[in-house]
């Protein structure tokens, strides 16, 4: 059955409750004590392991690899650099921590895994060895679209009420075969998903390729999505590698429509995507190959990339 997901409506409600509980802790302390929202020190069980990443591959030793399909999503949060010039560090931290915790909630409740916090956003994976590709795709589309909706409808109104400029969000997503591998030596190592899908998704979320409030996806993921949710846009490339010209088709995801349909009629949306899965060339998100390292190594704690906070 794969990782259990909560409904889109519940994920949307959870985001608002968690963000406000951190940003305005006095107002939500009663709810937290009553168990209506998760306590902040229990929000993300994976943090207790000392390492972020896909749990099925954290045991890999340095040099070991495992191949499996995955949906990769990069969320880019913009606007914090300007805020850092006018807000006290304590106030900025409340915004960053509230958004970070609430985002973790939406992604993990939606069936995804936190890969890492970059200097300007978060990287998430969807899919595991017991999850079908259409389940992983549905989870990724729902969670990413709901993140856009919650930032626009929950985070920014809270900031506006305090006279703070709104933040912005952009995303890049792609589906494909990923080579999971622990990169590094000994304790100075981390699990990384090596694939063109990963690098394309990361590139698409940047300001150079995607405007604020846009979500661009690659063609491998777009083939799963019903036509009324995507619009073809200018391709990535072409560029030349080893004498070959390479390019990638890109699509703009209508996250507002997808998020709205997720909240209003989730069953119809899922069936539409699953109908695509029946004619898809992809199979189950599982292990297809394993390569053992020549020397065992202690995985150790995972060093975070840049800083564990969002920036511009």
Image (cartoon, rainbow, N blue to C red):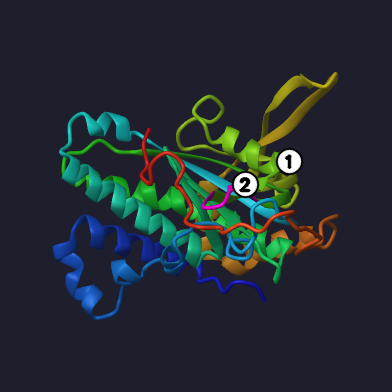
- Regarding residue 71, the answer to whether it shows in the image is yes
Q: In which quarter of the image is residue 44?
A: bottom left
Of 201 and 159, the residue lying toward us: 201
Contact (CB < 8 A) between labels 1 and 2?
no
The reply, left or right, for residue 134 in relation to residue 308 is right
Query: Magenta segment, which residues?
Result: 182-188
At 37% from the left edge and 65% from the top edge, which residue is drawn? Answer: 13
Q: Quadrant of residue 86?
A: top left
Name the spot of residue 219 as percent of width and height, x first. 73, 40
Name the spot of residue 21 as percent of width and height, x first. 24, 63
Residue 183, numbered circle? 2
Q: In which quarter of the image is residue 172?
A: top right
Q: Which of the marked residues, 1 or 2, is nearer the chain's N terminus?
A: 2
Of 80 and 274, the residue lying toward us: 80
Residue 219, numbered circle? 1
Query: Judging from the image, what secondary structure is the residue with disc 1 in?
Result: helix
Of 295 and 15, the residue lying toward us: 295
Distance from Cα at disc 1 to Cα at disc 2: 28 Å
Q: Quadrant of the C terminus?
A: top left
- Regarding residue 225, the answer to whether it shows in the image is no
Other-residue count near label 1 (Cα within 10 Å), few / some / many at <14 / 14–19 / ≥20: many
The reply, left or right, for residue 25 in relation to residue 154 is left
At 81% from the left edge and 61% from the top edge, which residue is drawn? Answer: 283
Q: Does the magenta stretch include residue 184?
A: yes
Which of discs 1 and 2 lies nearer the camera? The answer is 2
At 54% from the left edge and 31% from the top edge, which residue is drawn? Answer: 210
């Amino acid at each position: 059955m794969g990782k259990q997901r909560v409904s889109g409506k519940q994920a949307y409600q959870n985001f608002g409750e968690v963000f406000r509980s951190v940003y305005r802790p006095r107002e939500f302390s009663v709810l937290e004590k009553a168990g209506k929202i998760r306590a902040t020190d229990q929000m993300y069980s994976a943090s207790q392991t000392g390492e972020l990443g896909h749990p099925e591959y954290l045991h890999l030793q340095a040099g070991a690899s495992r191949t499996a399909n995955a949906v990769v999503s990069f969320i880019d949060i913009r606007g914090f650099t300007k805020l850092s010039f006018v807000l006290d560090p304590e106030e900025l931290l409340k915004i960053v921590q509230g958004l970070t915790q609430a985002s973790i909630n939406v992604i993990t409740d939606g069936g995804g895994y936190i890969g890492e916090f970059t200097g300007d956003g978060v990287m998430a994976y969807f899919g595991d060895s017991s999850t079908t590709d259409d389940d992983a795709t549905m989870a990724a589309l729902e969670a990413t679209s709901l993140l856009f909706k919650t930032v626009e409808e929950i985070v920014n109104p809270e900031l506006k009420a305090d006279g703070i400029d709104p933040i912005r969000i952009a995303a890049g997503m792609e589906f494909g075969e990923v080579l999971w591998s622990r990169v590094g030596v000994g304790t100075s190592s981390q699990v990384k998903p090596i694939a063109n899908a990963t690098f394309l998704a990361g590139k698409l979320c940047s300001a150079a390729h995607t405007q604020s409030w846009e979500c661009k996806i690659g063609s491998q993921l777009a083939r799963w999505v019903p036509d009324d949710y995507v619009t073809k846009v200018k391709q990535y490339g072409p560029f030349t590698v080893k004498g070959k010209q390479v390019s990638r088709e890109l699509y703009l995801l209508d996250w507002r429509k997808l998020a709205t349909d997720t909240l209003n009629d989730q069953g119809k949306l899922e069936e539409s995507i699953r109908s695509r899965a029946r004619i898809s060339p992809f199979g189950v998100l599982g292990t297809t190959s394993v390569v053992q390292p020549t020397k065992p190594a202690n995985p150790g704690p995972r060093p975070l990339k840049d800083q564990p906070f969002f920036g511009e």
